[in-house]
Amino acid sequence: MNTLKKLLFPLIMWSIIALFYSYQYLLQVSPGAMAEELMNDLRLNATELGTLAACYFYTYAGMQIPVGIIIDRYDVRKPLSIAAAICALGALIFGYAHNLPGIALGRLMIGCGGAFAVVSSLYVAANWLPIRYFTALSGSIVTLGMIGAIFGQYPLATMVDNLSWRSTMLFFGIMGIIITTLIWGFTRNRPNANHAKPHVLTGLKYILKNSQIWLLAIYGGLMFMSISILGSLWGTPFLMAKYQITNTAASANLSSLFIGLGIGCPLLCWISDHFERRKIIMFIASFGTLISIIPVLYFAIPYWLTAVLLCGLGFFMGGFLVSFNLAREVQSTGAAMGFMNTINMVGGALMQSVCGLIMDLMHPNSIAKGQKIYTLLDFQVALSIVPLTTIIALIMLYWINERN
């Protein structure tokens, strides 16, 4: 009974932080469910929409290493409360703004605040709970993030259809304020903690000189690009073009990607830990991603089979997280994990914009009802980045070393 009491409050803390992570993940993927409405309302082309969606990743990536330093020095309560408030305010600005710079500002703020979620959850798991719970909780946080991503597909698309994209974002801004209140009310700093200012320059210098860390970061980034490109923005419009279906139906189909990802991330990491083999799991993940995406992009397959393949695609994409386990064996520091995550996010952000640019170059002059209309071929050519980057990730495994 005493043990349960000791665990109860830390678990409540961790659960509220996990709720924030799920919430910010919903906001991360939200442009995909409202892409058509954003383009019509704001008169955006594909390049501008891709750049808008990428704004989240730029601030998220830029904050990864600073977040670890801030949490180490000030603990979680104040930094995370401020971060959640910034995220909520970003959602409100996104909903209120009537031009691209204003909406981009909201998106930048969402990424800045959301950057604190994962680090804070892992910090609480490591410092408030017995170490035997850490692996389970770190895997669970990914799964909970995918639940947020699933809500950012069909349910969000339904809200957009019934309420408009502006009202939907304002609703989620208010939800963010509620989550901020919960964080402030239920999180606590560690008692008697000595928060000395960390010295990270030496560690960063070592990381930047370590070729294995670079290889692992680039491999993880190439694999994560698929999630960013399909899951956060272009997956829903692509399915709408391929099957001539509504935004809601396409978002429902794309949800299977996040179901597979929520299963694959913790399971593939557990398998790699259990058998103490990383490269073979990373190879299977990359190869499975490749054979899953090709039929979805290029073949005329039934609608239901697309959902099955997207689920498998998400499962194999989860192998990107195994590269973090291998990097941890090379350099077990928060700075190394932050560097890995930074490369992941920057690559995903750049490729969202590149996809949009390719579509505009492919189809620059087609106008319908005052708006640009992109064909299935435009999407197929632009989204060919996904199998291409996956092939590069497979090739890079040759130079990655495994410590048995």
Image (cartoon, rainbow, N blue to C red):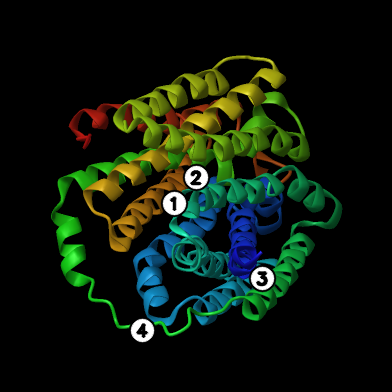
Q: From the viewer's perspective, is residue 157 above or below residue 204?
A: above
Amino acid at dot 1: Ala
Q: From the viewer's perspective, is residue 298 above or below residue 91?
A: above
> Would you say the residues marked 2 and 3 are in contact, meaning their CB atoms lie under 8 Å apart?
no
Residue at image location 46% in from the left, 52% down from the top: 132
Whether residue 388 is visible here, answered yes or no, is no
Q: Which residue is mark 3?
A: 97
| 211 and 365: which is toward the camera | 211
Q: Which residue is mark 2?
A: 228
Q: From the viewer's perspective, is residue 257 above or below residue 108?
A: above
Q: From the viewer's perspective, is residue 98 above or below residue 155?
A: below
For residue 225, side relative to residue 162 (left or right): left
- The numbered mark, 2 or 3, whose residue comes first in the sequence reads 3
Q: Nearer the viewer, mark 4 or mark 1?
A: 4
Amino acid at dot 4: Asn
Q: Which residue is mark 4?
A: 194
For residue 70, side relative to residue 181 (left or right): left
| 276 and 313: which is toward the camera | 276
| Element type where label 3 sits in the image | loop
Q: Which residue is mark 1?
A: 349
Residue at image location 45% in from the left, 23% down from the top: 288
- The numbered mark, 3 or 1, whose residue comes first in the sequence reads 3
Give x and y (percent) for residue 76: 50, 75
Give x and y (percent) for residue 59: 44, 65
- The numbered mark, 4 or 1, whose residue comes first in the sequence reads 4
